[in-house]
Image: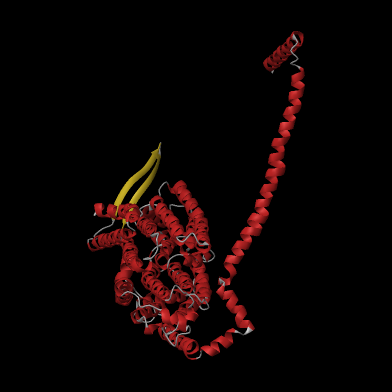
Amino acid sequence: MNSLALTLLILPMTGSLMAFIIGKIDRRYAFWSAELIGLVLFLITLKLYSSYTAPIELAFTWFELGSLSIPFGIYIDELSLVMLLIATGLGFLDIHFAHDYMKTDKSQPRYYAKVLFFIGGMILLVSAKDMVSLFMGWEFMGLASYLLISFWHQQRDPADAGVSAFLFTRFGDIFLFAAIGMLFYLTGTLDLVTLNTMATDGAIDKNMIYLIAVFIFIAAIGKSGQFPLFPWLMRAMEGPTTVSALIHGATMVNSGIYIVARLFDFYIASEALIVVAAFGAISAFIGATSALVQTELKKVLAYSTMSHLSLAFIGLGAGSLAAGMTHLVNHAVFKALLFLGAGAIIMSASHVKDMWRFGGYSKKMLFVSIAMAFGALSLSGIPPFSGFYSKDAIIATTLLNPQTSGLISTLTLIAGVLSVAYISRLWFLTFAGENRDAELFAKVKKPSFFWITLPLLVMAVATFAMGFMQDSIAEMVSGKSFEEPHVEGLLVGLLSAIALLAFIVYYYYVKRLDITKKIAQQPLMKAIHKVLFNGYFVEFFIHYFAKNIIVGSVAKTFNWIDINIVDATINGSKNFVKIIKGYLMKTHTGQTSDNSGVMLFGLLLMLVIVLVGGVL
């Protein structure tokens, strides 16, 4: 098992290099090498899962300096295995899908090398035994995401989007690095299991453990695209859709939630879970409401990712590891399905992303429409699809927990119910009714069944089948069976609200689209639309603060100090030295008598100093 674990860690990194080199010979080879490596990674994970009896632990020493020893270890338990199955399984399907999606791109070797490197970063992160190896996996994914989002860097928007992702996530990473330093200083260990135990036993200062937990959560906010660090998540849509599926479904955005789950006992002891729930509720509400008005297919799914990851955070924040992590697993599958489904639509529709130009596409893409309907039903929380059980459990948990009942539970409920509205709107505008752009509709090509449709159908079956596996999933990610909390009338109320919303969306976006357009022209609706469309202007305020406060005020103040104090002091000292030099030059005239007199004066001065020092 140890050799398999090491292979799992090393193969994607070496495979990344191999795909790039072989792809330079013939770019088709880049795909086949990536496809093979992706399959092997998934099969290794399946073998580890089927043979699992106890956690796999591998401990190494990265380097030693005197008494200082920095560890680097691997720890694979059931929680890690679930995350590995997501990363390698969805990663393999994503690579398979990319055969047609990236077929005409001349930079395929570079693309597949980056994808494998990205998957390798996620594998390292979820297999980490300590904060050092976790941080390395964390940063590998950050680098890979920047490279993939800006893959088409020749264009301005993808290049800017990559920089945006890099800066927003790096801001959070500063706090993670600080938390690692504080943990090592306070405890002398960075082992994740040991840190949980020490926190539970009260061996870490109460105030410091709270601060550390908040610092780690700030990093998680950045990586998982939560309020207020979510703008990069929307701009990441500039990358290939296959990249969006990886980032928004299978890997990167899950890492922030994973680190909170891995340190769940630490968070309970720190009493910082309420912070997690509060920011999750705000993020869920912003994501759900903003998704209602987006026009681009991928932007709807991006805001949906923000909202549903927030639900997972809320589940953890409300004290239910099972509900939060089960929803994360469910979300990974149905969101990867929806993103790749969006990729199939965009590719078939000449890379148009505007949903208002679609309509009636089920006539040309029947299997894609069915697969995306499965994903939409799961996201909406319709039984027996997987998303229903975890979302219902999260809402019930927030209502039953005294700390989260109230505003947090209300925002959670609104976000959960609104998910059916925005995903129904996406599906109806794309697949139902009549086409709204006859010229574009005539160009729509039927996607390849083997390369495009088959991965979608596999994920569609998975998101349906997982609805009957919720107990097993919950037990693997939390060690406890899935015991859904009961709130009287909640299920009936949610299903009624979902059915009503679905009918309203169908009526106004399929049957009476003319009324919808008239309503949208009202001044109040335009104002609301502008706020929601721009994500409550959070990115605008961040840029304004950075430009006018950080750069315009703080940076200018430091610049003034540098010029008028630091530089002035240095320049002034130069003039002072020149003056002293002038006086000293008078003592060196070249005359023997003058030089002798100065030397005698110096000797007398030294003698006086010695005598005075002796007396004192």
Q: Quadrant of the C terminus?
A: top right
Is 541 displayed left or right of 388 in the figure?
right
State which quadrant residue 426 falls in.
Answer: bottom left
Q: Find residue 572 and report its horizontal and vertical position in percent.
A: 73, 35
Q: Is residue 479 visible?
A: no
- Quadrant the N terminus occupies: bottom left
Q: How is the image coloured?
A: secondary structure
Q: Is residue 518 left or right of residue 35?
A: right
Residue 590 image-quadrant placement: top right
Give the total number of marks visible in the rendering: 0
Q: State whether residue 309 is above or below residue 361.
A: above
Looking at the image, residue 616 lies above or below residue 6:
above
Closest to the observer, 353 or 615: 353
Q: Residue at x 25, y 52 (%)?
A: 2
Q: Which of 258/608 is in front? A: 258
The answer to whether 172 is drawn above or below residue 366 in the figure is above
User: Would you say residue 341 is visible in this rendering?
Assistant: yes
Residue 527 on image: x %, y %: 62, 78
- 405 on left or right of 562: left
Q: Would you place residue 186 above or below residue 88 in this image?
A: above
From the top left corner, tell me how far across and down residue 125 is, in percent. 38, 56
- In the rendered image, residue 484, in percent from the top left (x then y), is placed at 36, 76
